[in-house]
Amino acid sequence: MRHFLMLSACLALAACAGGTSRQPADTTPREALVEPALVEPPPVAAGRAPPPGPYAPGFDAVHYDIALTLPDTGSYIRGITTARIALVEPRADTLALDLSGLAVARVRVNGAAVGHRQDAGKVYVPVPAAARVGDTIAVEVAYEGRPDDGLIIGPNVHGKRTAFADNWPDRARFWFPSIDHPSDKATVAFAVSAPEPWAVIANGERGDDVGPEPPPPAAGSTAQRTVWRWATDTPIPTYTMVIGAAEFGIGRAGEACAPSSGRCIETTWWAFPPDTAHAARVFRRADEMVAYYSELIAPFPYEKLAHVQSSTRYGGMENVTAIFYDERAIAAGRDIEGTVAHETAHQWFGDAVTEADWHHLWLSEGFATYFGALFFEHADGVERFRQIMEANRQSYVASDVVGRPIVDPMEANLFALLNANNYQKGAWVLHMLRGILGDSAFFDGVRRYYRAHEHGTALTEDLVRAMESASGRELDWFFEQWVFRPGHPRLRVEWVWDAGAREVVLTIEQAQPADWPTFRLPMEVELVTAEGPVRRRVELDQRRKLFRFRLDAPPTVVRVDPDGWVLKEEVGMSDTPG
C-alpha cells in the first residue's frame, strides 16, 4: 500500500527509526563564538579532463568516512573526512587528494598530525616512510568553508532551505577530500549533523554506529540538531557519493522482488511536502523497474533505492541508492517516468559497472538510455519502444556532434561529454548490436560484461570481449565504425524492376561525408508484392552496391531495414519502380 509520512513528525518522536541521534542546541554564549580565521583557497574549475593514464598512480581509495555539519543559516560547512588509502605500487612520497575551495584545518595520517600543502585544488599529504606496498593508511582531513560547487545549499523551489550534493563529473572535491575519479571506487559512510526539521538521505543503509562524530557547527548556530548516519559496503564512484537534506515527505513505491535471486528491495520516494502527490504518481512504477532489471541483468546491486526530489543541475542524477531528480519537474507535475527508468538502469550501468575513463562515458549513458527504453518495451509494448528509439535517432542526427566519435579523447571539457553521442547514439549502438546478434546472444553478452565488472570499472574493449564471447563472433569491426569513428550512414536507395530477368535491381549508396567510415551494414530488405512481403538479408560494405532479388512479380514497395535496426538517415529513396 502506497503511503507517505512527514518526516518532521517522525523526528518529533523520541524513538524514530535507527540511524539518527539527537544533539542539543549549542548553548555557548553567542559572543563567545568566533568565526574561524581559516582562509578558503580559490577553487579550481570543474569538469577538466585529466591527462591520460592512471589518475592517482600508486594509490587506491578503499573507504571514506565523511562527517559533515550542515549550517542552519548561510552555507558554511565543517567536515572531517577520513580516507583509507591502500598503497598498490612502490610508494610515492606524497598522496594528492582532491579538495577545492575549502580550508584545511589539520591533517592526520594513522592518527598522527602531519604537515600538508594545499594548492590548486589538491591537498598534498606525506606518506609515512615505513609504509609499503599492500599497506593501508588512514588520512584524516578536517576542513571548513563555503562550498563553491558540489554541495548546493539554499532555497528550494518552494523557498525552503535545503542542501543537496551534486557531484558529476568531478565536483565531489568541492565538499569532501577524495581521489575524485571514476576509476577509483570506494565504500563510504556518512555522519551528517543537520538542523531540525531536516531529514538526510544518502547512499546505502541507515545505521546507528557508522561514521565518526561530526564537528561542531560554525559560530552562531542555535538550532536543535540530528545526526543522520548512512553507509554502503559496496564500492561506488565518488561522483555518486551524496547527501540530501531538507524537509521531506516520504512514500513507499513498493518492494521490488526478483524471483531468480529471492531478494527484495524496498523502493521509496522523498519529496518536498507540497509535491508528494506528484511524486507518488511519477514513481508509481519505480518498483517494477527494479524488478525488471533485476531479472534481465542481475540482482539489484545495492541495499535500497530512494528517488529524491532535489536541487540538481540535471534532470536526474544516478547517485547510488539515492537518485536525485530536478525539483522543478516534480513540483510542476511533469511526467518524468522516462527519466526514472533511465536513472534506475544506471544503478547497474554507470554505478555498479563504471567507466574507467571519462571518455568511455557511453558505457554509462548509452546503456542507461537503451535499458531505460527497454523497460517501456517490456511494460508498454514494442510500439512504445520504437517511438522512444526514433526520438533518440532524431535527437542524434540533429545534434552538433555527429562528426565526432563516441569515444572522443580529444574532448577536454567533461561537461561536453553529456551529448547525443554518449546518450542517443550509444543507445543505438546497443540496439544495432542486438539486431545483429539476436536477443539470446546480446543479453547473454550484457550479463557476462556485467558479471565480470560488477563493483569495478570497464572500458569499451571489455564490452567487446564479452559480446564476442557470448556470440562467438568477431566484433572489432562493429565497434570501430560505430564507437571510435564519427558519423552514421546516409543512405540513398533506388530500385528498378528488370522484367526480362524477373528481378528487382536495388542500388544502395552511402552518401555520408568522405571522412566518415564506409559502414559495414548487415540488414534486411523487404520487397512487398501482391502476394505479400518477402525479406532478404544483405550486407552493405561499399559506398555503392547493387543487389538483385528474383521475384515472381514486380514489387510495389521496397524497404531497406524495415524494422529499424540501423542508425541511419535516408537521403533519397524511391518506393516505386524507377
Image: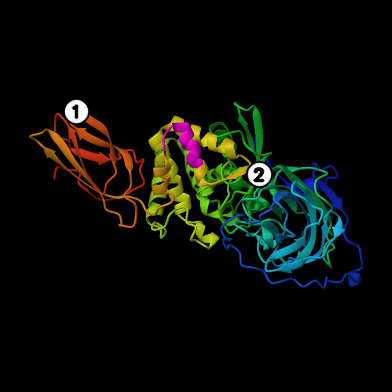
Left or right of 341? Residue 255 is: right
Is-magenta flag for residue 225?
no
Q: Amino acid at mark 2?
A: Thr
Pointer 1: what residue? 531
Q: Image height check: is 481 above or below 172?
A: above
User: Is disc 1 placed on a helix, strand or loop?
Assistant: loop
Most common SS among magenta residues: helix
Question: Can you tell which mark lies on residue 140?
Answer: none
206 or 457, nearer to the observer: 457
Pointer 2: what residue? 321
107 or 476, nearer to the observer: 476
User: Is disc 2 placed on a helix, strand or loop?
Assistant: loop
Q: Image height check: is 66 above or below 347?
A: below
Quarter of the picture holding the C terminus: top left
Tell me where residue 70 appears, x and y as whole percent: 77, 59
Tell me where residue 563 appears, x and y as whole percent: 33, 38
Left or right of 91? Residue 419 is: left
Mark-to-mark CA distance, 2 and 1: 55 Å
The quarter of the picture where residue 216 lies is: bottom right
Q: Amino acid at mark 1?
A: Glu
Mark 2 / mark 1, whichever is N-terminal: 2
In magenta, the rendered stretch is 463-474
Q: Image height check: is 501 above or below 222?
A: above
